[in-house]
Image (cartoon, rainbow, N blue to C red):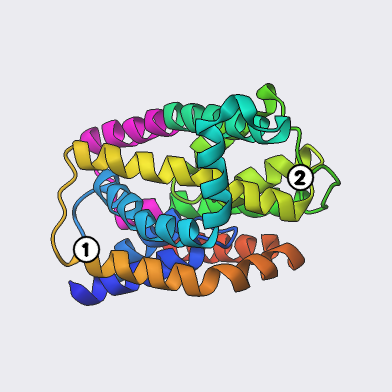
Amino acid sequence: MMLEQFVLGIVQGITEWLPISSEGMVVLTKTTFFSDASGLGVIIQHAIFLHLGTFFAALVYLRKDVLFLLSSTFQFQKAEEETKSMIRFLLITTVVTGIVGFGLFQLISEIDDVAVITGKSIAMLIGVLLLVTGFMQVWLHKSGQRKGDINNLESFVFGAVQGLSALPGLSRSALTVSAFLLRGFDKTYALRTSFLMSLPVLLGGNVILALGDFVWDSTMIIGLLASFVAGLLSMHFLLKVAVKMNFGYFVLAFGILTLAFALI
């Protein structure tokens, strides 16, 4: 059990910054290498819990941005217009992501209650969604020039796109960065903003878990610490690599391999 938590934490910590679904990778690792009859909904809850480790890693890495935005929120009227725009953007995306993501999670839980979801069917679902993620990255790789001035309509769309990542296999970072690139934003700006907009959602998701029926034990702390350390050590390097490389072809290949494994 301790080894399982450690491995899942490492997987979460490294894949969170790559344009691959970290949630999908955690679910796939758990169902493939560790026997688990909990059901897809419970496994996704576990994956969300592990996101708390990478939340703290991102919080440490982006601490200057976070502290500046928090202080500006309390002095909103005195803040510059660009800062006000970012605060509004984060507020809108958080609310919209919460609505879309929670709705999808409830749908998964209801399906889980009335149907037996096997490890192979989970792998097939993740494989298909990885192909969707990969195609998006291959199609939308070109960086634009915009570095701010996100309007309210774009904020709603980006929030909804982020909410879709509740489906294991759809990468949150790949979906949101692709949406930014489609609107002509600079890729470095898109990556950094993508991680900023994830922070309140990851924190809120774990607050909801704590208030709900999620059951955890002390060994999960090992997974949480592994996720935090792996995330903090890999974040800077992988963000730089992600700017220069197109991971779309890698994700497509991995999606095909996942489907092949599920069909064997």
> Is residue 55 left or right of 71 when viewed as pictured?
left
Q: In terms of secondary structure, where does tag 1 sit? A: helix
Give the Cα distance between marks 1 and 2: 36 Å
Q: Amino acid at mark 1?
A: Met
**Camera-side residue of 61 and 42:** 61
Which range is magenta?
A: 101-123
> Is residue 205 left or right of 239 when viewed as pictured?
left
* Residue at 61 percent of width and 62 percent of height: 251
| The residue positioned farthest toward the right in the image shown | 145
* Residue at 19 percent of width and 44 percent of height: 214
Q: Residues within 10 Å of mark 1 (few under 14, many from 20)?
A: many
Q: Amino acid at mark 2?
A: Leu
Quadrant the N terminus occupies: bottom left
Q: Main secondary structure of the magenta part?
A: helix
- Residue 132 visible in image: no
Residue 180, which numbered label? none
What is the x, y in percent for residue 133? 61, 50
**Camera-side residue of 95 and 81:** 81
| Among numbered discs 1 and 2, the one appearing first in the sequence | 2
What is the x, y in percent for residue 38? 19, 51
Q: Residues within 10 Å of mark 2 (few under 14, many from 20)?
A: many
**Camera-side residue of 35 and 146:** 146
In this figure, which residue is indicated by the disc labeled 2? 181
In this figure, which residue is indicated by the disc labeled 1? 220
* Residue at 52 percent of width and 29 percent of height: 91
